[in-house]
Image (tube, grey):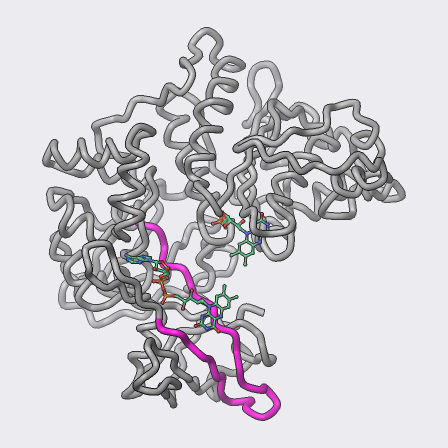
Amino acid sequence: SQTGTAESFAQEIAREGEDMGFKVRVVDLEETEEDLHGIMLDERTRDADGRSRAVFLMSTYGEGEPTDNAAAFFGVVKGKAGIRTNFPEQEGSRKDDDGGDDDDDGFAEEKKGEGDDDDDDPEAAGGNDDDDDVDPKFFDGMDYLVFGLGNRQYEHFVAMGKLADFCLNKAGANRLAELGIGDDDDDLEADFEKWKDEVMWPLLKARYVGDDVPAEGEKPEVKEKLPACPYVTEYLPKDAAPSEPDVIKAEDMHTSTKHYFTSVDCPVSVVRELRTKEDPGSTVHLEIDISKAGDALRYNTADNLGVLPVNDDSIVESVAKALSLDLDAQFRLKPARDGEEHRHAALFPTPCSVRECLARYCDLTSAPRRSELKLLAAYARDPLDRTALLRMASKEGKAEYKSKIMGAHVGIADIVTKLCPSISMPLEHFVALCPRMLPRYYTISSSSSVHPDSVHITVSLLTAERPDGSIYKGVCSHHLAGMVNSGTVRVFNRD
Ligand SMILES: Cc1cc2nc3c(=O)[nH]c(=O)nc-3n(C[C@H](O)[C@H](O)[C@H](O)COP(=O)(O)OP(=O)(O)OC[C@H]3O[C@@H](n4cnc5c(N)ncnc54)[C@H](O)[C@@H]3O)c2cc1C
Ligand SMILES: Cc1cc2nc3c(=O)[nH]c(=O)nc-3n(C[C@H](O)[C@H](O)[C@H](O)COP(=O)(O)O)c2cc1C
C-alpha cells in the first residue's frame, strides 16, 4: 500500500476474521524484507495439518510498479519464481500470440489455468531460469489469495496483483481462487467487498471452518461493543513544557507514514498570484527556502515536492469540541499490546499536542470509506445516528452513501460535528479510525542549478462547490496559498 487503501482493506479483513474466529495477523510487506519465509511460513502460522495461509492485498504504482513497501518482497518472490519482468503474463501471451488478457468482467479477471504452457515455462513468461535463487517449492505449504488494487486508466492495470498471484503460484504456493480485482477508477471499495464477501470468506470458511459457510452475500454481524483499539495514549502532565517528539529509528516508523518523520520545515519566502483579477480561479507561484535543509532536500528540476498539509484551524477546533478533546494536551501514542511487534509501529511523531495530531496527521475532510462509517457507528450513542451510518455502510445503502457522503463531499469532520453529533470516542480510537493525512505532490518548476537554495512550485487552488452550495477548499493548496505573510511548510523530495 502506498496511500493506505490496501492497508485499510487488510485491517477490515483482520477485524471481520477475528469476529469469525480466525487468528489474523496484518503484515506490512516491508516487514518481510529480512525473513520472508519465516514470517509467512513459520511454524506458528501453520495449522495442525501443517499448512499456512495468506491473503495478499496488492496496489500498483508508477507504470506497473510495486509500492515502496512491496519492492523488496517482489525482489524475493520474482527470484524464487524465476521471473524478471513485472508483466509475465503479457510476455507469455505475446509469445503465444493469444491476444492477451484483457478481460473486463468486474471484480475478477480470467486467469490462465494451471498446467498452461506459459505458466510452466519461465522463458515464455519473461523468466530467468539461470538464476540460482529459483525455488519452485519456496512457498510449499501455503494457501493464498490475491486481491489487486489498481486503476483502469493506467496501462498496466493491477500489474502487481497479477505479478504476485503469478509468482506465488510459480514458487510453490497453492492458489485458492482466481485473482480478485478492484478498480479505483470506478468503485474500488465495492469491488473489494464483493470479492471479500462472495469469494474470500465463503472459500476460507468452507476450507477451514467446514460446515459454517455463509449464504451468498451474507456479511458478518456488526458488533455493538466498542471495537478494540490498537493504541493507547499516554498524556503528559498538564503543566509540562511543549515536548520534542521522541527520536524514532527508521525501522520503527510506520512504512506508509515515514514522511511524517523525515520531512523538514522550510520557510516560504515568496507567494505570488499568477492570474489577473478578471481571470477566474487562483494559481500561485511559491518559493520555498531550503538553504537550511541540507542533504534532506537536494532536488532536480521536475522532481515532485511532497508537502504535508495542515487542516484549517476552524475544522480542527470543531472536531476537538465534538469529541471533548483538549487541543493543548500533549500525549504519546503507544501500541496497546506492549512488547509485541514494535517494528513499524510509530504512526506519527509523538509526544505532540492534540491540535498537532488533528491538524497534521488526520484526514478530516476526505469522504470516509463505507468501512469507516461502519466503525464510526459503533461510537454513536444515538440509535438514529447509528442506524443511518450502518445503513450507508451496507450494500443496500450504497446509493445513499454515494449521494450523501461522496457526492456531498462530506468528511469525518462533518460527520462527528454535524451529521452524527452523538459520536463520542477517546483520542486513540479516533486516531485508529481516521485515515492519515496524505502528502500532496507539486512538480518543482525551478532549476536546481540556478536556484540550489530554493524550490519553486506552481499551485492551482482547488475549490469545489458542494451540492448544498457551500464551498470546499482543497486542504493543501489553500494551506500553501495562505503563506502570504511568511510561514513554514513541511516538505520532502519524493524523487
Ligand atoms: C505527481 C503529482 C504532481 C502534482 N503536481 C502539481 C502541481 O505542480 N501543481 C498543482 O497545483 N497540483 C499538482 N498536483 C496535485 C496536488 O498534489 C493536489 O492534489 C492538489 O493541489 C489538491 O490538493 P488539495 O489538498 O488542495 O485538495 P484536497 O483537499 O486533497 O481535495 C482533493 C479532491 O477531493 C475533493 N474533496 C475531498 N474532500 C472534499 C470535501 N470535503 N468537500 C469537497 N470536495 C472534497 C475535491 O473536490 C478534490 O477533487 C500533483 C499531483 C501529483 C500526484
Ligand atoms: C502515481 C500513481 C500511479 C499509479 N499507477 C498505477 C498503475 O500503473 N496501474 C494500476 O492499476 N493502478 C495504478 N495506480 C492506482 C492505485 O493502484 C490505486 O489507486 C490503489 O487503490 C492505491 O492503493 P493504496 O492506497 O493502497 O496505495 C496509480 C496511482 C497513483 C496515484
Q: Please, which residue is most extreme toward the front here?
A: 278
Image vertical order of residue 361 relative to residue 301, above or below: above
Dominant secondary structure, magenta? loop
* Number of marks drawn: 0
User: Which residue is rendered at x = 42% and y = 35% of the image?
Assistant: 190
* For residue 228, side relative to residue 37 (left or right): left
Q: Position of residue 214 (x, y in %)?
A: 41, 14
* For residue 200, side relative to residue 219 (left or right): right
Q: Position of residue 124 (x, y in %)?
A: 85, 38
Magenta stretch encompasses residue 453:
yes
Q: Please, which residue is most extreme toward the right here?
A: 130
* For residue 9, side relative to residue 328 (left or right): right
Of 264 and 468, which appears nearest the observer?
A: 468
Can the viewer see residue 389 in this picture? yes
User: Which residue is rendered at x = 85% and y = 40% of the image?
Assistant: 95
Q: Position of residue 109 (x, y in %)?
A: 61, 32
Splitting the image into four quadrants, where does ligand 1 fall?
bottom left
Q: Please, which residue is most extreme toward the bottom here?
A: 450
Magenta stretch encompasses residue 20:
no
Q: Quadrant of the C terminus?
A: bottom right
User: Which residue is rendered at x = 70% and y = 41% of the image?
Assistant: 77
Of 95 and 309, which appears nearest the observer?
A: 95
Q: Find the magenta span and give its range.
A: 434-461
Image vertical order of residue 149 relative to residue 359, above or below: above
Of 276 and 76, which appears nearest the observer?
A: 276
User: Which residue is rendered at x = 19% and y = 59% of the image?
Assistant: 469
Splitting the image into 4 quarters, where does residue 438 fall? bottom left
Image vertical order of residue 375 relative to residue 357, above or below: above
Q: Position of residue 245 (x, y in %)?
A: 34, 66
Can the viewer see residue 133 in this picture? no
Splitting the image into 4 quarters, where does residue 99 fall? top right
